[in-house]
Image: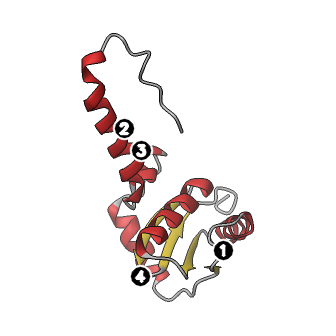
Amino acid sequence: MSINLAYDTEFHYLFPAKRAIIYHFIIQAPKLLNYWSVLRNITVDASLKKSLKAQAHHLKPVVLLGAKGLTEAVTAETNIALLSHELIKVKINGAEKEDRIIMADELCQQLHAELIQMIGNTVIMYRKNEEKHK
């Protein structure tokens, strides 16, 4: 993603501040767990999140991310799992903490799912399936 600030002549005096803001929100913020869900306007209120955590407690991981990381096959399998279960656990192995956070956020962003909780290398994801509730 490239952002060209050279054409912004009206606010040229703000260039350093703009660069700092862009760096913070584009580079650093994706490391935060719920950043992308705020941008996607997916909202899960606190009571629903608490309920989903309780429901997910007894679940076993249905998707495992291995050494190859986040691939198209993993994304497709996670999508199928979310369609059938809505609430799933994903286990991310073979990566450091920051990489796990980034992979979990990326997966949630690609599938338009909500990241409910991340403990260690286990991620709880939720995406409401409208067809299932009809």
**At which x and y percent is residue 109?**
55, 54
Of the two numbered discs 4 and 3 on the same chain, state the one appearing first in sequence. Answer: 3
Total marks in image: 4
Residue designated by label 1: 68
Whole-number angstrom distance, CA of label 1 to CA of label 3: 25 Å
Q: Quadrant of residue 62?
A: bottom right
Instruction: Identify the amino acid type marked 1.
Output: Lys
Residue designated by label 2: 22
The residue positioned 27% from the left and 30% from the top of the image is 16
> Between tags 1 and 4, which lies in front?
1
Residues at marks 3 and 2 touching, judged by CB atoms closer than 8 Å: yes
Looking at the image, residue 81 lies above or below residue 14: below
Of the two numbered discs 1 and 4 on the same chain, state the one appearing first in sequence. Answer: 1
**At which x and y percent is residue 1?**
54, 39
Specify few, some or many for label 4: CA neighbours under 10 Å numbering under 14, 14-19, or 20 or more: few
The answer to whether residue 109 is visible is yes
**At which x and y percent is residue 132?**
68, 63
Q: Quadrant of the C terminus?
A: bottom right
Farthest residue, direction top: 10
Q: Nearer the viewer, residue 35 or 101?
A: 101
Q: Nearer the viewer, residue 110 or 20?
A: 20
Instruction: Identify the amino acid type marked 2.
Output: Ile
Specify few, some or many for label 1: CA neighbours under 10 Å numbering under 14, 14-19, or 20 or more: few
Which numbered circle lies on residue 26?
3
Whole-number angstrom distance, CA of label 4 to CA of label 3: 25 Å
Residue designated by label 4: 120
Whole-number angstrom distance, CA of label 4 to CA of label 2: 29 Å
Q: Secondary structure at mark 3?
A: helix
Whole-number angstrom distance, CA of label 1 to CA of label 4: 19 Å
Q: Secondary structure at mark 1?
A: loop
